[in-house]
Each structure stands twice: as structure tokens, then as C-alpha cells.
Image (cartoon, helix red, strand yellow):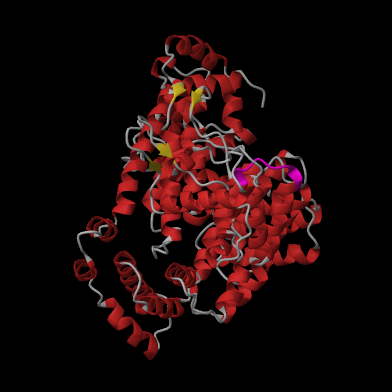
Amino acid sequence: ELYELLEKPFDHAGLPEDLEEKRQAIILHLWNNQLYQVSKEFVTNAVSLKPGNTDKAECTCLLCLYKRFDFAAIIEKLDNPEIPEKAENIARLAFIQYVMGKHLDAVKSLKALEAKGEISQQMKYLVKSNLKRLAWLLDYYDEQTQDVKELAAPLLSIDLLQEHDLLENTYNKEVLEWLHESKFYNEIMYEVRQCTTEIRDLYNSKSSGNHEATRELLEWFEGLSDFIHQNGIMLNLGGFQEPLASTFIEGICASIKCNSHLSGRFVGLSNRFVEVVLLNIHPEIIYKYANRYKIKKIPAVEALTGFHKKWRLLFLQFPTIQAYHLANDSNKMFSERYERILYTTMAVFSLVETTDAELNEFCSFVIQLFKEQKMFHEYKAVSAILFLIDKNKKNLSTETIKGFTELWLTSPGMRSPRLLNLIADIVDEREEKIDLTEDQFKQATDYFFSISETNNTNDGWDSICELFRVLSSEEQKKVITEYALNKLQSNFNAGDYYEAIMYGVIQPTDELNTLYLQFVEDIVSMKPREQFWWNDEFFHDRRVDQFFNYYFKFKISIPDHLRKLLKEFDPYYDWLLDMEDFDYKNFNPKWLQNYFSYYFKQEYRNSKRLKEFLQPYIKDNFDDADAQRVFMFTYGYED
């Protein structure tokens, strides 16, 4: 009867509501204990089990609150918790205390669970394993008071092998071994690797047809996540399975980009999939594989109501969460977990197909949170914001762009040249400018002028140049121009000069141009050196490449003695000096890819001899993808 009940589709009709609820509870219990199929004697086909949408019921148990990211409710419940009657509920209380960084309370709960005589041997082993994990965390995260030291010392000495041997009997031998040797993780790691390898092969071969690897990949990883959370196993959530998580996300990204005619590929996001990702995945993994597989947006297979509720709670409850953090300053573990979940949420939202209104509303929450936050360092936040902006730059409103610019101005930790560069690129592409008040402008220039004078990096100077190109006020731009000229005249730096001149912060002057030519002459006078850091077939120096970009833009005069040195420096530079009279028998097509800027492209386009060489060359060399690409972008497209 049980087999026949489980055999029915999950959303079948006809069962009374109470019976359907029991049926779903059975499926969830089996699934949470890594039992994904049931079979029956004399029946060939096993029934695959998968729980339905658990977002429907608004359960208020601690675990469900955690999965919904209702941290305010959890904080309130944990303020003065009562030890539950049921053993599994005590285990979950300890687990939530652990994820909230309340390690001392988690130890007390596990001690209470340990004192119950009627728990199973495998649960006793999990209690010991979790206590040992908590001992390490007490030693690392918590303030080392005498009470903490006295509590942690005996827990650190727990011998899990000895505990395994004491608890083992004929009936539980396999289960205890499975827990003790972490087979519940290692076996799934193997399966996930196998699935991802198959999916990667399908991606590379552009195969069509049908394949089950993506479905299996999802089931293995989702099942492990459920098993860990439901059984309260205290591993380093959001990081314990980083190699596994990385392999899983690569498999999903490769599946998304498989041949569209491949049946079984990953077709879209569900609330359940998003929940598993938010609970377990570091954002850096998403950045890595979304960029590697060139994923812009991922459709949804259902309305992502659960996800939208989660991210709203994350932002709306932030004042409560921050107050909790500031009141428990030693509790670093929870703030790290919240930060990881926040950035993963931002990464997922970056890839979700949304309306422009939803996108800009989400960004307004992001901007407001980082204006108010005092919980964590912003360097990781910059990466999250860069990913969010980059994946949605065409749909961000002018108001949102202005908001991110003000965030960059007012939050010292956000003052990344990469962030301002991305904002400036968007503003340039839209042919817009940004208005800054005099106070905002003074705040920015005071900071970046100071950084430029005292810091050995180029961050201050880079930001000054980026700021210049987005400003609407000519008066404000004039202040930056005067500063740049004075600095270069008093202490010339060729890299700073090149950047300022190419961004239009200053215009060439005879004095500065002479200093720049002398800098280039000093470089080429040293002659080519062995290039340890790249394996190109010709010698080139990035600083000399930049000089040619400057030369092509401003059409400056190069003295004869410097021309001679450049010709001798490498045939590549001989060709750049005179593309029309160069002997193309000595031409290397790899030169075309070295520095493909707008001004280089204009020179390529204006050279008749280069085009005469390339037309027959690309017809005869279909395998030279670089030359094919350069020809197409130089002659086949308008700028």
C-alpha cells in the first residue's frame, strides 16, 4: 500500500487533505535521509521520490524560519529558548543556535539532548560529532573567557573513532560507518563530479538528444543539502562543501549553455533550486562560472515568489540584524554567514529575468543597506555590486546609476576604481553625465587627491580620471584638470600622463610630450629582454604599446632617433610605424591581437596594404581565429 501511495505523482488529485499531508511527510522524511527511490519485490521500475514545494506552508519552526531568512523571528525565539520535548527538535534547535553563532547555547542544547536516554545510537554519534565541531568554533570564534575554555577543553578531546566503536552494533554498523567516514558527503561528491563531467562533455560537443545528468546532478546536491539541514549536521554551511559546490555550479552553468535541442538540460530556476543555492553556495563560485560560460540571464520555470520573499526579508530586517550583530560583537560567525547569504542573493538576482521596475527596486534596497551597514568590510560588497551592475547595466535607471555613484562617493570602502570605471562606461554609452553637488565633489576630490599623493598604487589617480569623464560640470572638471597638470609638471609620471591624456583630463603640451618621449626612449634603449611572464612569439612592452595608442590618437611627431630605436626594438613596432611600406613577408598575424584599441583599429582600417594582405590570408587560413576576428571587427562592423 505504501509503494502504491508513493508511486502516484506528487500533485495528484483525489486524496483527502490529511492523507496527502502524511504522504508528503513520508516522502520528505525519506528524502532527508538520502533515500531517493523505493522499489517493490517483482516490480522492475523503482519510484523516484522528490518533495514538492515546501514554500506553500508558512511553518514557524526554527529551521523553516532559517530557510526563509526570517532572522528577526529567529533572534526573538532564541532570546530565551525552551528545550523541546522531541529529540529531533532539540537537534534542530542546537543547529539553528549554531548557524546564528550562539555556540555556547548550542552546546547546552546538545548536552540536554545527550541526557535523553531514548535517542538512537546514530543520533548519539551525531551529538558527539557536533560537540567536537562546536569546540573548535568556541576556540576560534568566541571570546576566550574562563567558562569558554573550561567548556571547550573536554569537547576538544572527544575521540570520534572511539565513540563510533562504543556505539556500533549489528543493526547500525553501516549507518554509523557512513556517518563517521563522511560517506554521506564523499559519495555525493563522486556522483556530482560524474554528472558535471558528463554535462561538460555535452556542452563541448554541442550534442542534442536526451540526457539525465542534469536531473541527477540536482537530485544529488539538493538531497545532500536537505540531509544536512534536516539532521542538524554542523558542517561549515556555505563553505563546507566548497569543492562540491563549485563542481555543482559549473555543471548547472554548462547545462544552461548546452545545445538548445538537448532534452534534459537545465531550463530554468525554481524556488527550490534557488533556496538550495542561497543556503550553500559562495557568491564567488557564481561569478566564476556565470562569467566563464557567458551566462547573462536565466529564465524561471515558475513564479519565484519564495525567492522574492527571501530577499525582501534580508533587506527589510537588516536594521534588526545589524543591531543584533552590534550587541553581540564577538559573534563573528553569524555576521559572516549573513554576509555570504546576502552576496549570494545579489548574485542570483543578477541572473534572474526580472522587470526593470523589480531590478531598480532591488538596487535601491542594495544601495540603502550599504549606506547604513556597519557589520562587514566592503571589499566583498564591491564584487557583488560589480556583478549586479554588469549583468543589468542596460536596464538600470539613471536614478539607480546615480545612487551607486553616491554610494561610491560616501562609503570609503566602496571607492574602488573598478566600480567607478563600470559606472563611467555605462554613463558614456548612454551619453549621459552625473551631477554632483559642490559638497559631494569636494568630498571626492579631497579624498582622491590625498590618495594620489600618498599611495603607491594608482587607485587615487585612476579614480580622478574616471570621475572626470562622468562629470557634467565644466567647472568641476576644470579643478581636476588643474590638479593633474600641476602634479605632472612637478613630478612627472608617464603612466599617470598616459591615463590623463587618454581620458581627456588634460591635452598634450610640448613640455609633457617631451618628457613622455624621453620615457619611451629610455625603455627602448634597454633593448628587448626575455619575457618570462608570457609566451608570445614576438617581443612587446605594454608601456610602448600605450605610447603607440597615444601616437595614433594625437598624431604627434616622433623624432628620427626614436623612430630608429623603435624599429630596432622589434619588427612589430617597425610595422606600427609604417604599415604601408612594411615588407609583409615579415608580417606576423599575431600582432593584430596584441593591442586592439579604438585608435589601433582606425590605423588598421586606414591601411590599404594591411587589407590587401589580410583578404587572401584569412581565406587561406580558416583556422586562424584571431586574424578572422580582427578582420571582421575592423572591416565588417561599424563602431
The quarter of the picture where the N terminus appears is top left
The answer to whether 107 is drawn above or below residue 439 in the figure is: below
Task: Please tell me in which quadrant of the rendered image residue 68 appears.
Answer: bottom right
Instruction: Looking at the picture, tell me which residue is in the foreground, 300 or 391.
Output: 300
Task: Please tell me in which quadrant of the rendered image residue 321 appears.
Answer: bottom right
Magenta region, residue range: 350-357
Asked whether the viewer can see residue 544, the reply is no
- Please tell me which residue is depicted at 60% across the width and 31% down the height of the picture: 599
Question: x, y percentage for residue 627?
Answer: 47, 21
The answer to whether 79 is drawn above or below residue 30 in the figure is: below
Q: Is residue 62 left or right of residue 505?
A: left
The quarter of the picture where the C terminus appears is top right
Task: Please tell me in which quadrant of the rendered image residue 120 appears.
Answer: bottom left
Looking at this rendering, what residue extends furthest in the front direction?
A: 1
Instruction: Looking at the picture, tell me which residue is in the foreground, 87 or 263.
Output: 87
The answer to whether 200 is drawn above or below residue 461 in the figure is: above
Question: x, y percentage for residue 136?
Answer: 34, 73
Q: Is residue 460 left or right of residue 363?
A: left
